Image: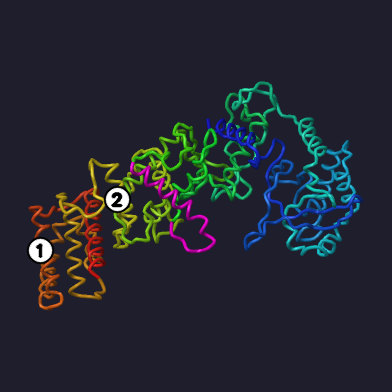
Amino acid sequence: MTLHALNSYYERMMAEVDSGMSAFGTSVENISFALVLGADGTLREVEDLRDQSSKKLRPRKMPVPASVTRTSGVKANFLWDKAAYLFGADADGATVKSRERFEAFNILLQTVGKDVEDGGFLSVKKFLQQWDPEQTEEVITRFVPWGDVCNTNLVFRLDGTIGFIHDRQAVQDAWLKYGKDNSDAPLGQCLITGAEDVPLARVHTPIKGVRGGQTSGGYIVSFNASAFVSYRQDKASVAESSAFAYTTALNSLLSGDSRQKITIGDTTYVFWAKCSTPAESFLADLFDPPSEGKDDAEEQDDQQTASKIQSLLKMIRDGRKPTDILPDLEDDVRFYILGLAPNAARLSIRFWQVTSLGDLLEKIGRHYQQLAIVRQFDNEPEFPPLWRLLCQTACLGKTENISPVLAGGLTRAMLTGSRYPQNLLSVVLERIRAEHHITYFRAALLKAYLLRNTTLKEVPVALDLDRTDQPYLLGRLFSVLEKAQEEAIPGANATIKDRYLSAAAATPAQVFYMLLKNSANHISKLKKNPETKGRAFHYDVMTQDIIAGFSDYPKTMKAEEQGLFMIGYYHQRKDFYTKKTQEG
């Protein structure tokens, strides 16, 4: 199903003008320089093709004759390759190994183009015949620094003509004919297209762009031992053209400039639709919503997009139709989401979902609806990105400490509407106990978990003075006692939150009697100061009103009750901060 969907995406993109998708027999590679040759094969110029729009020069993505898979040995590419293959020299000079690569490049060129009479192709043949690997650094340095060239990929161009030599029609025809004539692939039925008696791919193109994977790429279809053989077939029944299609499509989705991929934890997700839809270009923003109100001139163009995404998120969170803001959206368009994670030389498929766009947006809207809680600070995102939520579950808040299992489970819950990971609650409570700090993101996670994974039907977004749940009231009470202590002993090295927050949530009966006794001293101290006397009475009344809501303190509270305790504390604390701002 996955390969079939990727193959269909490739066919869809090939039908679109300027899609940038590579045709069969080619691959998109990083090319840095072009050797500009005269008709006689002399080197006229070394043209820098790198992208200079940013501070760091980056190679240009360019379709070239399909690359070979190098695991060991010497294998040359056709009409493009690294300096060692084109010049017979690299950063170490004209070594024996580099000369072998130069010879392999020359042999492949002669073999493929034995009947080609194209002028550009002939100039390359002349160039290779007269090139001296020993003089490589000296000659190239006349045009550009050798250090910039020696480890890059290069192509050829004929001086005075537009385009590159590998793009000439005669050269392309020769390359495709060579591939067809020299294929010893067995014939069979393609499991993707169903076509019969077609050449089956022996090795599939590596998939690159998965975070944490090998730079040379990994495979989602591969065999390397008899233990993996089934039905007496040592290779997957995938036609060469279909293998090229699905790998090209996936590599395109995983490319550096793709807006159809995100990375959460150790898993890279890509997504695409069965037909063209505006959702493909902004779905990544639903996972990581852009912020509004940026002042930098370079980012002003993004403000309109950010505003539209924020409006869309508010609509789907509130259960409204996204077509109100994006009329071109079609709710019934089929959408595919694929999650990949590195696994040695292979790639593991961590997640695969086929759904409609309308259903997907509904699930995302429900996720943000359940996360919704009053923000601690105004500059915090109204729609928290998944990666920021996950950082709140990790030691020191570092992404490398995020649990892959938790990250995958949280993402799956967001996309499918399933329950949040069972360990989410315990992990968030553990971080609160370790750091003595309830952040906006942690409070949002607690609220979402309680709504989706427990029998609670409603958890307030902001302070609810009418709520009678004992854990919620105890959390509010703890916040009031902490506030009274802060007012009575300003600048204290440690507050009751630093010492007793976890114990108060887990074993209230062992802690609150002592806290209330100490709080009486704090309030008494505040009453003695004319400037704080009014606040002392206020905290005293609040304490009594909250205590009146329950009869006794429980000996212990379950994890779910501790989560509600933390939300009650967070709400009351935020309310204190809000009132103080309004009074000032």
In the displayed structure image, the side of residue 467 where residue 21 appears, left or right: right
The residue where tag 1 is placed is: 541
Secondary structure under tag 1 reads helix
Task: Please identify the quadrant where the C terminus is shown.
Answer: bottom left
Residue 172 percent across, percent down from the top left:
78, 38
Badge 2 crowding class, 10 Å Cα cut-off, few under 14, some 14 to 19, many 20 or more, is: many
Q: Is residue 309 magenta?
A: yes
Mark 2 residue type: Leu
User: Callout 1: few (<14), some (14-19), or many (20+) C-alpha neighbours within 10 Å?
Assistant: few
Residue 93 image point, x, y percent: 80, 60
| Element at label 2 | helix
Q: Is residue 447 left or right of residue 85?
A: left
Residue corresponding to mark 2: 446
Q: How is the image coloured?
A: rainbow
Magenta-tinted stretch: 292-318
Q: Is residue 69 magenta?
A: no
Please tell me whether mark 1 or mark 2 is closer to you in this view.
Answer: 1
Q: How many marks?
A: 2
Whichever of labels 1 and 2 marks the residue nearer the N terminus, that label is 2
> Mark 1 belongs to which amino acid?
Val
Out of 17 and 202, give the one closest to the viewer: 17
Residue nearer the viewer, 555 or 23: 23
Going by the image, does 366 lie left or right of 579? right
Dominant secondary structure (helix, strand or loop) of the stretch shown in magenta: helix
Name above or below for residue 432 compared with residue 421: below
Q: Are marks 1 and 2 in contact (CB under 8 Å)?
A: no
- Residue 12 image point, x, y percent: 60, 33
Task: Work out whether 357 lies above or below 492.
Answer: above
Q: Is residue 191 above or below residue 86?
A: above
Looking at the image, which residue is at 75% across and 29% down? 184
